[in-house]
Amino acid sequence: MKNKLFILLLAVILSACGQQNGENGETTFKQPPDLIVISNGNEVDAVLGTYSWTYDNGDGSFTGIEADSFGPTEIVKHQSNPIKTKLGSEVVLDFGRIPNEIRVRIWDNNEVLREVEVEDNTFTTDEQGTIVYEVYATWEQGSAHYSVELNVE
C-alpha cells in the first residue's frame, strides 16, 4: 500500500513539474504527454517508453532529453492492468495534446508482428487474445513510444 501511495504522489508531483509557461504565454511541456487508452468504456494509462524531447528553458536555452527503455513487451508489465475489450471494438488514444503523427504496431515475443491502421486517434481491434500494442507519436517537441496491453475477447 505504501508503494502505491508513493508512486501516486510521485506521479502527481511530476505532472505538476511537467509543464511551464514560456515568455509568450505558450505552454512548454518538459516531457511527452500521458496517453490514456479507452475501449468499451474501460480505460488505462499506457506505459511511456523510449522518447526524445526538447523544451525551451525560457532563458534562450533549450533542454533535450533522450530516454531509453526496454521494449514494449517488457515495459507493458508496468501497466496497472490490461483493458478487457472485444474483437472489432474501437480503441481511442487520448494524449491530451494532439500529436502530428501516430503509428500503432502489435508486438509479440520482443518483435513487431505488424502495423495497425490508425484514423483520428482511433484503431479497431482485429484479433483476439492478449495483445501488446506499441504506440509511437510525434509532436513539435519530440517523439515518444508507449506500450499498452489489451485482452481482446
Image (cartoon, rainbow, N blue to C red):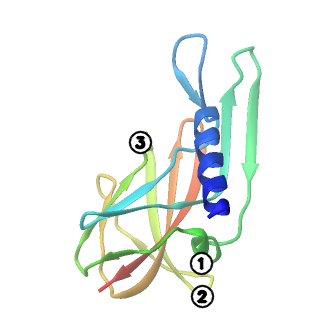
Q: How far apart are marks 3 and 1 (CA)?
A: 25 Å
Amino acid marked by disc 3:
Gly
Badge 1 vs badge 2, beta-carbon distance below 8 Å: yes
Badge 3 vs badge 1, beta-carbon distance below 8 Å: no
In this picture, residue 113 sits left or right of residue 18: left
Q: Position of residue 55 (x, y in %)?
A: 66, 31
Amino acid marked by disc 1:
Thr
In the rendered image, which quarter contains the C terminus? bottom left
**Residue designated by label 2:** 109
In this picture, residue 112 sits left or right of residue 91: right
Single out the residue that lies furthest toward the top: 24
Q: What crowding class fits label 2: few (fewer than 14 Cα within 10 Å), some (14-19), or many (20 or more)?
A: few
Q: Could you say whether the residue bearing mark 3 is in a helix, strand or loop?
A: loop
Nearest the viewer among 119 and 24 is 24
Badge 2 vs badge 3, beta-carbon distance below 8 Å: no
**Residue designated by label 3:** 96
Q: Position of residue 113 (x, y in %)?
A: 50, 83
**Residue designated by label 1:** 73
Vertically, is 130 above or below 150? Answer: below
